Image: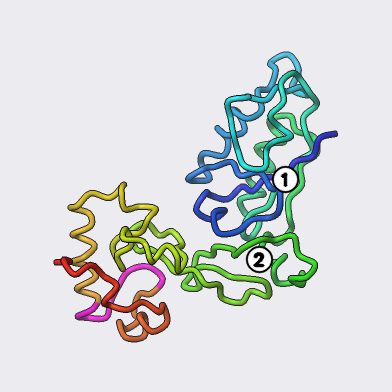
Amino acid sequence: MLQVVIDVRNMYEIRIGKFKRAVDPCTESFREFPSWVDNQFQLAESDSHQSSVNDNTVTEGAEDLNSSGPKELPRVAMYCTGGIRCEKASSFLLDKGFKEVYHLEGGILKYLEEIPEAESLWEGECFVFDKRVSVEHGLAQGTHKLCYGCKQPVSDEDMESPKWEYGVSCPYCFSRRSEEEKERARARHRQFKTWGVIGGPDKGRSPKRLEASDGVKEDKQPRNSV
């Protein structure tokens, strides 16, 4: 029986870390996962135990899935950050006719906490929804920072891009944000620098402490910022 490991998180989470050979559904939100399953596995109406795979769908790590013709539904293992999304995804797959569906108990965080790096199949860092932004093995704080324009993780390399402007945009949202949105973000950042208040995970932290912890220098911002 074909076996497949699916990462049910979003693209921006998977971008900074995943398990080896796990399938990336390339979803921007968890709400898109059911549609991905429907498109990836074309279930035959007459037999829910058979499927054919949509050859037009290309997902990282899904090479074994992209073969034509009917086949038995695969054994599925899934994982997410803490396990909650996997519970919902498991129920959905079982309703779709998948017979063997498993998920990583405790999610990635439990795995990173318990499995030594030398024995681990995890590659990269795990995005978390708090001020740490990302964690590594042993749940040590990772190296990624947060873009306040799109709330996506950014690396040191990302912050060298001309599309990076602290508090405004990053390479992942620069082209999607209008100049009006960027100007509003600049105004919020000026307010933060003046009053020491900002939204998101750094709310309440003073500008001096934030810049020191993030390793961001003010002179990295464009000179023509308003």
Residue for point 62% across, 33% down:
37
Residue for point 76% across, 47% down:
102
Question: In the picture shown, does residue 87 fall above or below 218?
Answer: above
Residue 136 percent across, percent down from the top left: 62, 71
| Image depth: mark 1 or mark 2 in front | 1
> Looking at this view, is 106 or 171 the one in front?
171
- Residue labelled with disc 2: 109
Question: In the picture shown, does residue 15 fall above or below 52?
Answer: below
In what element is the residue under mark 2? helix
- Residue labelled with disc 1: 5
> Looking at this view, is 146 or 170 the one in front?
170
> Looking at this view, is 50 or 121 the one in front?
121
Q: Quadrant of residue 84?
A: bottom right
Question: In the picture shown, does residue 16 fall above or below 195?
Answer: above
- With 24 as the anchor, is 215 left or right in this view? left
Residue 56: within the magenta?
Answer: no
